[in-house]
Amino acid sequence: MEKKTKLSICIPTYNRAAFLRFLLTTFVEQKVIDFPYEIVISDNASTDDTATVVEEFLLQGLPIKYCRRDVNGGGWPNLANAYQQAVGEYALYLADDDLLNFQNLRAAIVYLNINPETVACYAPWTMYDAIDQVDLSLFYTIEKNRKFSRRSFSDVFDFMTKRHIFPEIAIYRTSALRSAFVPKDFCFWAFSHLAHLLDVGAVAFLDKPFYRSVVRTAVVRDRAQAGNDEAMTGWDRYRGGLEYFLYLGSKRGQIDLSPAKSTQYEEACKVFTMRRMSVALRMWFERGEYIKAYEIFARMCYGGGSQHPEIQGLRERLPLMVAVQTLAQKVNAASSLKYLILDQVSSVDSLASLLREVGLNNNITILPAPTEHTPEITSTAAVFTSSAAGRDTFLDNGYRPNMVFCESDMVSSVVT
């Protein structure tokens, strides 16, 4: 009699054949999975050779279930399709460009086997260098395994917010996913899904990571990380997820939303969100998106985070970069523009270099103040000058009023 499938490893993919080949190779090479499993690949209508790669590994004996969608319907439907096709007792999401720690995966399955009341088994994950084949760091840490009984919303909320835990990587009891895995747009899915899972059973957080988030690979050495994009933009969704979690807990009678307790929960949500915003602030600054970084800076200061180390570290450097990038974007936005004149600046070359660095279009020629203000220049040039008097001079020579900027125009809106 055929053994029942224990684990469904669900891999959504789209035009990632090279990554998929690398990932499936690790399954061929592993030796420690000693229970029946399947690899469910949901193909979001790929136009590359994904199907050929799948056939190649089917011939090598991997237990693959290949499900191809007729159209690319987006990320959530593709993952939902993988889960809904799964027949294993447990299900695990695996990105097509990440890997598993098979030894720890086996231990997590053993944990679920001996804890039948547990519907989800969470764990931290490691950042992994697939070129040097080394685990780099844990996304969060847990000293020992923790299990929370069904509907212990208050305890789980405190656990997550005080330790800054993201419940993103888990093995689920597949039967629980039918009600727990539901679409969410404004509430971060990991918190809202955890709320639904906790509503139907116990959840556990394990100390040993079974998931490896690949940060460097020979397949593509520099690639976009979806998690990075979430960290840079998703703090309001993080807060929404926590609020959703609290709401469901309150409806189950496990979260006290009396005025005093609501204030405490509100503060915990704010502190958690501010910490995520500080990460986004740093990442936007490092990416050279200074205006976006300043928007987060302003919101953090308003929220009481003016003494945060990230705020203090950028307070001196941010205003100049925001002002220069603002000038670049204003100039880029103007139609029929050929020139940017830099007047009364200490070094035209240095400022020109900085403007290019922050995004000034290459088709805009940068000039020092001309000796002759011809109609061709006055009609196609923007001007930056350090003083109001300098602005008046250019206006007197026929330049367009809203295309002549002085230093105060750029810095007056940047308040640190």
Image (cartoon, rainbow, N blue to C red):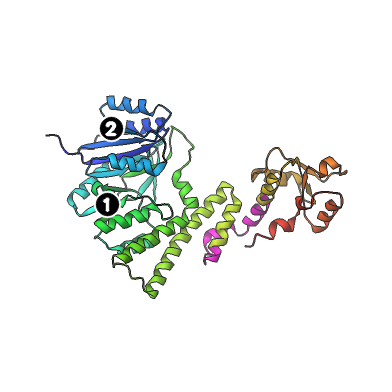
- Image: 48 above or below 354: above
Marks 1 and 2, how far apart at CA: 23 Å
What amino acid is labelled 1 in the image?
Answer: Ala
User: Which residue sits at x=36%, y=25%?
Assistant: 52
The residue that disc 2 covers is 64
Q: Position of residue 403 (x, y in %)?
A: 76, 50
Q: Position of residue 333 (x, y in %)?
A: 68, 46
User: Which residue sits at x=20%, y=47%?
Assistant: 110
Q: Residue furthest left?
A: 1
Q: How many marks?
A: 2
The residue that disc 1 covers is 120
The quadrant of the picture occupied by the C terminus is bottom right
Q: Residue furthest right?
A: 372
Q: Which mark is residue 340?
A: none
- Image: 346 above or below 12: below
Q: Secondary structure at mark 2?
A: strand
User: Which residue sits at x=60%, y=51%?
Assistant: 290
Q: Judge whether residue 313 is colored magenta.
A: yes
- Image: 8 above or below 244: above
Which tag, 1 or 2, sits closer to the chain's start?
Answer: 2
Can you see residue 309? yes
User: Which residue sits at x=28%, y=65%?
Assistant: 252
Q: Quadrant of residue 211?
A: top left
Q: Judge whether residue 321 is colored magenta.
A: yes
Classified by dominant secondary structure, the portion drawn in magenta counts as helix
Numbered range of the magenta stretch: 300-324
Q: Secondary structure at mark 1?
A: strand
Of residues 73 and 166, the one nearer the viewer is 73
What amino acid is labelled 2 in the image?
Answer: Ile
